[in-house]
Image: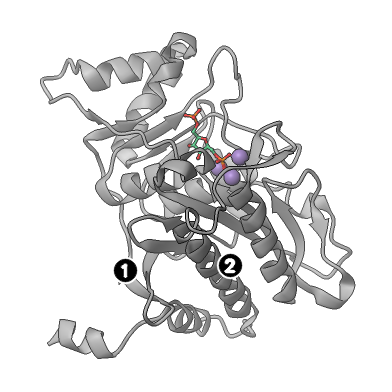
Amino acid sequence: HGADANRTDLMTITRFVLNEQSKHPESRGDFTILLNHIVLGCKFVCSSVNKAGLAKLIGLAGETNVQGEEQKKLDVLSNEVFMKALKSSGRTCVLVSEEEEEATIVEPALRGKYCVVFDPLDGSSNIDCGVSIGTIFGIYALKDVHEPTIEDVLLPGKNMVAAGYCMYGSSCTLVLSTGAGVNGFTLDPSLGEFILTHPDIKIPKQGKIYSVNEGNAKNWDGPTAAYVKKCKFPEDGSSPKSLRYIGSMVADIHRTLLYGGIFLYPADKKNPNGKLRILYEVFPMSFLMEQAGGQAFTGKERALDLVPNKLHDRSPIVLGSYDDVEEIKALYAAEG
Ligand code: AHG
Ligand code: MN
Ligand code: MN
Ligand code: MN
C-alpha cells in the first residue's frame, strides 16, 4: 500500500527540509525560509523557460556580461528573479551571480546569515532549441555576526552548508543536498509544489557513459586524452563507454548522477583553467557528487578543497562515479 499512501500523503520539499532541520535544535527555520525563496525563483524561471517561445523571450538581450559572453534575455530575467527572491527572503547577506561582476552585499535591513552563489541560467546556449537548461546554487553560512564581505564566499567548497540545482527539462526537477545525502524533487505543475521523487540519490560506483566536449580534443592535456582513449578502446576486455554530451552542465550532471559515469571539463592548452566557474558551477556540483557517493577532482586535488581567489575564477573539473574518477586520478598521478 506504500505507493497508494504516497499518492495522498505528499512529501513536499518544504515538509522534507523542515523534517531535516528539526534534527538541529539550534535551527530556527531560517534555512527553510531561504529555500522557499529559492524554490519560488525556480518555479518562476521554469514557467518563463516553458513560455520562452511564446513570450518572445528567446534571443539576445543585446548586452554582454562580465565574461564577455552574450547574455540572453532569459539569463537577464533569471538573474533578476533570483536576486530579488534571495534579497527578499531576509536571510541572505552576500550574493554572487554568474551574471554580475561584483558581489551584492545585502542591505542591513534585509540581512540574514546565508551567502548564496548561483548560476541563474546554466546552459543558455541551448535555450533557442528547447534543450534542458537549469539553475545551480551553493550556500555558505556566516559563522559569527560580522559585516559581510566577499571573503565570506571566497572559501573552499567543503565549507558549503547546502548546494543544489533545478533542471528545466521534460519535467522540472530540483536536486538538493544539505550535507546529509542528496534528494530529488519534481515539480507537480498542478499543485505548484516540488514533491520528493528521488529519495537518497546514490551514483552508481561505476558507469558506462563519458561526457565531454570532444571538439576540444586537439588541446587536451595528456591524462584527459589518455582517459578518453581508454573509454573508446578499453584494453582490459570491457566494453567501450557511450558518449553523451548535452552542453548544459545541469543536464549532463543530472544524467551522470542518475545513470553513473563521468563528466569532464578539463584544462586545455587554450584554457589552462578549463571553462567552468568554481563558485557556482564546480563547487555545487562537486558537493552533490560527493554527497551521492561519487568524486570530484580538478586534475590536482579534491575539487571541494579549492579556494577561489576571485568570484568568477575557473577550474578544470572531472566528476562522477567513484571508480571512474579513480581511474583518471591514476592517470594524473602517473603523469607526476
Ligand atoms: P552558462 O550557460 O551558465 O554560461 O554555462 C555554460 C557551460 C555549461 O553549462 C556547460 O557545461 C558548458 O558551458 C559547455 O561548454 P562548451 O560549449 O564549451 O562545451
Ligand atoms: Mn553564461
Ligand atoms: Mn553555467
Ligand atoms: Mn549561466
User: Residue placed at 89% from the left, 64% from the top?
Assistant: 147
User: Residue placed at 74% from the left, 69% from the top?
Assistant: 87
Measuring from the top left, give residue 107's x and y in whole percent. 87, 69
Measuring from the top left, give residue 61's x and y in whole percent. 67, 44
Label 2: few (<14), some or many (≥20) within 10 Å?
many
Which residue lies most toward the top here? 218
User: Dot 1 corresponds to which residue?
Assistant: 199
Specify which label sits upstream in the sequence, 2 or 1. Answer: 2
Relative depth, front residue between 22 and 272 = 272
Q: Amino acid at mark 2?
A: Gly
Label 1: few (<14), some or many (≥20) within 10 Å?
few
> Where is residue 104, by image quadrant?
bottom right
Reply above or below: 30 against 202.
below
User: Dot 2 corresponds to which residue?
Assistant: 41
Relative depth, front residue between 40 and 149 = 40
User: Residue placed at 30% from the left, 56% from the top?
Assistant: 202
Q: Is residue 141 left or right of residue 102?
A: left
Image quarter in which the N terminus is found? bottom left
Measuring from the top left, give residue 47's x and y in whole percent. 49, 66
User: Residue placed at 39% from the left, 28% from the top?
Assistant: 212
